[in-house]
Amino acid sequence: MIEVRNLTTKFGKFTALDDLNLSFTNTKSIALIGPNGCGKTTLIKSILGLNVIETGDILVDGKSVKDDYLYRKDIGYMPQIGRYPENMSIGQTIRMIKDTRKTSETHLDTELLENFELEKMYDKKMGTLSGGTTQKVSAVLAFMLDPKVIILDEPTAGLDPLASEILKNKIIKEKNRGKLIIITSHLLSELDDIVSEIVFMNEGKIIVQQSVTDLMTERKSEKISESIISILKEMKK
């Protein structure tokens, strides 16, 4: 479980997060959405410990991220654009991450590795890969160490339809295993089958945090995209 308490983040005069309060609970797949510049990336970086928290706090399983950096070992992260040493092969990159975390082979989740058939490409250098293949490597690394929390930033960007479906099924499976999945995406249509809760942000604040079922009932819509469009229309009034 992740709790964000009175989190405020400023960059000069710009307020990226404005006294933010919210909680993410296990067994849920949560879509974190909103217009560009709304604070999504800043929030994710704060959860990952990449931003210094000066005002407010973030608790992971009841412990402040300010006090113990080891909480990060329980978080898997798939960036929107993965950047890896260009001269290392796929196999070397995967082994490097495994060795860094010192995780035994018996505790590794290799399902995506096998379903994406990346082992056939182990000798290919990271610098020569297409964007879609790099995304597959990022997805494998996010899930491989069997973390309790998985954060996916635009996860299907660059993936072909088959790879997207494989990843979606994996997200659903891990949510059903009790994990917390946080997804950011601009493709609202891809969220319908995989998320259980929506967090909509704007100008560093939470506008909506609601279950998908309640949101669509309240908005009298059949799709998440329709619900979000109705929220955006209200914001413009």
Image (tube, rainbow, N blue to C red):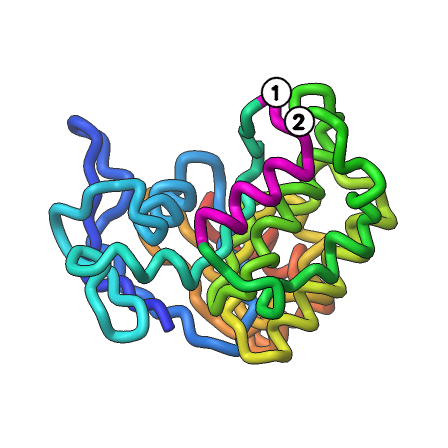
Residue position for label 1: 87
> Does residue 73 appear in the picture of this structure?
yes
At which x and y percent is residue 100?
45, 47
> Which residue is found at the position 61% from the left and 63% from the top?
105
Residue position for label 2: 126
Give the residue type at disc 1.
Asn
Give the residue type at disc 2.
Met
| Extreme residue toward the left, this view | 54
Element at badge 2? helix
At which x and y percent is residue 156?
70, 45
| The magenta segment | 86-101
Q: Which mark is on residue 115?
A: none
Residue 106 colored in magenta in the image: no
Please determine whether, in this image, residue 207 is positioned above or below residue 232: below
**Mark 1 Cα-neighbour bin, 10 Å: few <14, some 14–19, many ≥20:** few
User: Left or right: where does residue 62 sit relative to residue 97?
Assistant: left
Are the residues flagged by discs 1 and 2 in contact, CB closer than 8 Å?
A: yes
